[in-house]
Image (tube, rainbow, N blue to C red):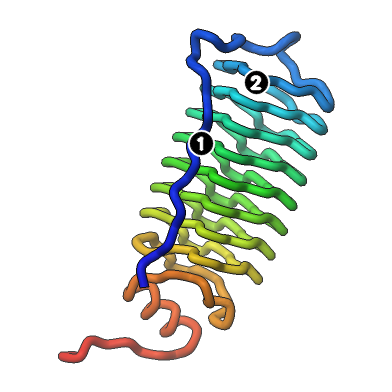
Amino acid sequence: MPSKHRAIESPILPSLETMNKGIPDKQLYESESYQNVYLSNCQLQGTKGVDFQYAYFDNVKIINTYFKRLSLQDVRITKSDFANTQWEEGSLNRIEFINSRLLGFKAIKCRLKNVVFQECQGQFSQFTFSKFDNIIFNNCNLENSTFLETSLTNVKFINCQMNNVILANAKFKDTDFRGSNIEGLQINISQLKGAILDPFQAAYILQRYANVVVKTVDE
């Protein structure tokens, strides 16, 4: 049965010419709201209750830091670095991550909707007790990442490297893995309901976890 993946809602963004360049004092303040901002070639530290709406992040470093209740809506993020950053109870809607680095990134109890990860490096990332709705990972490296107790609804992994990914007690609904490399994938075969696999992936999982050998008719 073909995937019923809904179209992703793209960020609603004003033109760059009308946006504010940078933020006051070049740092984030707790419970502050930032709208219509363009951030480029800067480094920021995490805090609590920050809200971004209608924003561009270009070559921004937000590494080795912690955010709680971060809210992002209508944001495009390009060539930015979130390595070893932890987001807890975050909310993301209509977001694009493009050619960005998320090595060791942690999302705990976060809600993601209408988010695209395009050509991102996400090795060793961890998504825990989070909810994904209408998400695309396109040509991303997610090797050795973990999706723990995470709900994946209308999520599509396109040409991704998912070697040794752990899907522990994850819940699927129209979750499409077709075309991605899932070698070493760790999953309980009983939780596959709602997952969409190509024939090679299905054969691999059956042989790995159920000792079922799949062969073509003429073999």
Is residue 149 depicted above or below 7 in this figure?
A: below
Q: For the residue marked with disc 1, what is the amino acid? A: Glu
Earlier residue among tags 2 and 1: 2
Q: Residue at x 69, y 65 (%)?
A: 149
Left or right: residue 101 versus residue 34 is left
Q: Residue at x 61, y 35 (%)?
A: 82
Distance in Å between CA atoms under marks 2 and 1 = 19 Å
Is residue 174 depicted above or below 45 in this figure?
A: below
Q: Residue at x 54, y 81 (%)?
A: 189
Left or right: residue 138 versus residue 81 is left
Among all residues in the image, which is located at the extreme left? 218
Residue 200 position within the rendered picture, expressed as x and y whole percent measured from the top left: 33, 74
Residue at image mark 1: 96
**How dense is the environment of label 2, judged by Cα within 10 Å: few (below 14), some, or many (20 and up)?**
some
Choose between 213 and 38: the one closer to the eye: 38
Residue 65 position within the rendered picture, expressed as x and y whole percent measured from the top left: 73, 34
Q: Secondary structure at mark 2?
A: strand
Q: Nearer the viewer, mark 2 or mark 1?
A: 1
Residue 54 position within the rendered picture, expressed as x and y whole percent measured from the top left: 60, 24
Q: For the residue marked with disc 2, what is the amino acid? A: Gln
Left or right: residue 40 versus residue 156 is right
**How dense is the environment of label 1, judged by Cα within 10 Å: few (below 14), some, or many (20 and up)?**
many
Choose between 97 and 61: the one closer to the eye: 97
Residue at image mark 2: 43
Q: Secondary structure at mark 1?
A: strand
Left or right: residue 160 versus residue 142 is left
Rendering quarter of residue 35:
top right
